[in-house]
Amino acid sequence: MFDASIRSKIAELPNTNGVAAQSGEDDKNLVADGVEEGVPDIETHTARLLNLLNELRSFADQAYDEADLAKLEETSNAKFAELESRIRDQETQLKNREIQSQHLASERDFLVSRLKEAELAAEQAEAKTHQFTERMEAELTNLRLQLAKREESLAARDLALSRFEGDLRTHIQNLQLRLQDTEARLAKPGKRS
């Protein structure tokens, strides 16, 4: 996982085992000289080690950030999958509602059509009833006129019959009077004319 540049920098570090390993009496001066000469090297070496340590920390932070990113990506993918699932569910519900809406619209259209047919049938029945009523009223009016004419005719006949009857009675009475008068004349013997 180490970056290639960090590996190469670690490999470039000088080996310090030789300086620490020289501990003989003869070489005390060499060691002291080496330590004095190595002081600037130690500072450089320390600086390099600190730089490497900082780079390692940076790399560790990046690795930590990458782990966080991986965790975040995993969490995001899970949430994304959940959201996709919810969207699919909502789309399914929306499609179901659209189907229900289409079904209800179709049912509404059918009922509106039936209502219009019923209203038209009612209007036609009302028109026929109105025509029938007008025809019956006209016929009734005609019958009333005919009845009035017949009644008038019957009244005129009754009047004529009453007059005729009156005339007949008068005539019958006259005839009866004449008959009685004739019978009375016949009953008297001696008077013949």
Image: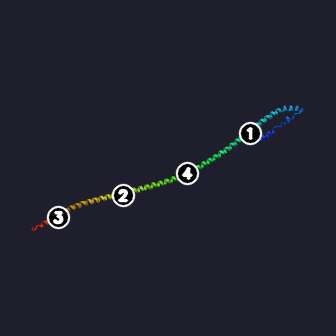
Q: Nearer the viewer, residue 103 or 42?
A: 103
Task: Identify the residue at image location x=74%, y=39%.
Answer: 60
Please, is residue 12 above or below residue 115 in the view?
Answer: above
Give the residue at mark 1: 60
Q: Quadrant of the N terminus?
A: top right
Disc 1: CA contacts within 10 A as few (<14), some (14-19) or many (>=20): few
Q: Nearer the viewer, residue 40 or 191?
A: 191
Q: Do labels 1 and 2 touch, CB within 8 Å?
A: no
Which mark is in front, 3 or 4? Answer: 3
Give the residue at mark 2: 136
* C-alpha distance separating marks 1 and 2: 109 Å
Lower sequence index among marks 2 and 4: 4
Q: Do labels 3 and 4 touch, CB within 8 Å?
A: no
Q: Is residue 101 left or right of residue 19?
A: left
- The location of residue 42, given as percent across then percent down, is 81, 33
Q: Amino acid at mark 3?
A: Gln
Task: Identify the residue at image location x=57%, y=51%.
Answer: 96
Q: Do labels 2 and 4 touch, CB within 8 Å?
A: no
- The location of residue 110, given as percent across then percent down, is 50, 54
Helix, strand or loop status at disc 3: helix
Give the residue at mark 3: 176
Which mark is in front, 1 or 2? Answer: 2
Q: Amino acid at mark 1?
A: Ala
Give the residue at mark 4: 100
Which mark is in front, 2 or 3? Answer: 3
- The location of residue 168, given as percent across then percent down, is 20, 63
